[in-house]
Amino acid sequence: MTEAFSSTTLQRAVLTPTLTKQCVGFMIGSSLFALGSALALGGWASAATSNACYFVGAWFFTAAGMAQLLLSGAVTVPVSYGRGSMVRAEWLAAATQSFGTLLFNVSTTAALGVRTISAEKHYVWSPDAGGSVAFLVSGVLVIVAYNHVNNAWSPRDRQWWSAQINFVGCVAFGISAVGAYILTSGDSVNNAVANVGTLVGALCFFFASLVVLPFASRARGGPLSTS
């Protein structure tokens, strides 16, 4: 009985989404993306090593994105116009970002197996660019959701900083996708831009999660979280 209870308790502890798990997941995924791009930028490791960092990091992104979606609340909210309800910006932002993480899973998994430039263009760049677009849309929606219930200028609020830093990261990922686009000649538009964009974006996502991490809030004397 005790063993069954312990097993159930452990499963709930592992599988129940919390803000802490969400933040830590994004921070680990971001760290691996930053490492992969830094290695590529400095020429310190092979492309296979960088791709392995991206592959593992993308799974942490996906797990964190799913936790974020589950924590985002109801899909719709009642309104006094139109059909009487509308999709909440916060839920839509989480859903869009979660979809983007799945696209990064596709691209990073494909990157481990491609052997030709044409295969890389077809199997890697397209889902990678799609993931970047999804992240950019979600970044805009995060700011919309925040501004809907808060002042647009609230630099004393950690949530405000998280939204702004997250948006910068989304833009950086978009720039990275442009730099990584493969031309008909077989060359990327600009490998340096692609790697720097990924590095900046990853660092932004790391700090966007860090500033709202419940443990960090407690250390600063902020409100306790139920996470």
Image (cartoon, rainbow, N blue to C red):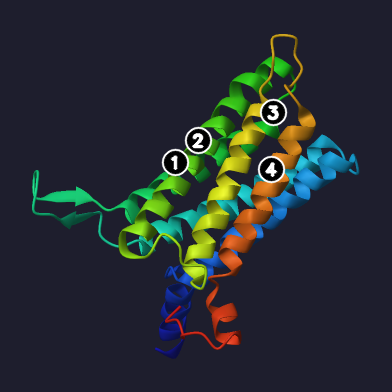
- Mark 2 lies on residue: 133
Q: CA distance from mark 3 to mark 2?
A: 14 Å
Residue displayed at 69% across by 43% down: 198
Q: Residue furthest right?
A: 44
Answer with mark 4 or mark 2, whichever residue precedes in sequence.
2
Q: Position of residue 119 (x, y in %)?
A: 66, 19
Q: Are marks 4 and 2 in contact (CB under 8 Å)?
A: no
Secondary structure at numbered mark 3: helix
Q: Is residue 153 left or right of residue 113?
A: left
**Amino acid type of the residue tagged 1 in the rendering:** Val
Q: Are marks 2 and 1 in contact (CB under 8 Å)?
A: yes
Q: Position of residue 149 (x, y in %)?
A: 31, 64
- Mark 1 lies on residue: 137
- Mark 3 lies on residue: 179
Secondary structure at numbered mark 2: helix
> Which quadrant holds residue 187?
top right
Secondary structure at numbered mark 1: helix
Mark 2: few, some, or many residues within 10 Å (few <14, many ≥20)?
many
Q: CA distance from mark 2 to mark 1?
A: 6 Å
**Amino acid type of the residue tagged 4 in the rendering:** Thr
Numbered circle sitting on residue 198: 4
**Amino acid type of the residue tagged 2 in the rendering:** Val
Answer with mark 3 or mark 2, whichever residue precedes in sequence.
2
Q: CA distance from mark 4 to mark 2?
A: 14 Å
Mark 3: few, some, or many residues within 10 Å (few <14, many ≥20)?
some
Answer with mark 1 or mark 3, whichever residue precedes in sequence.
1
Q: Compared with residue 221, is residue 16 higher up or lower down, i.e. above or below?
A: above
Q: Nearer the viewer, residue 126 or 216?
A: 216
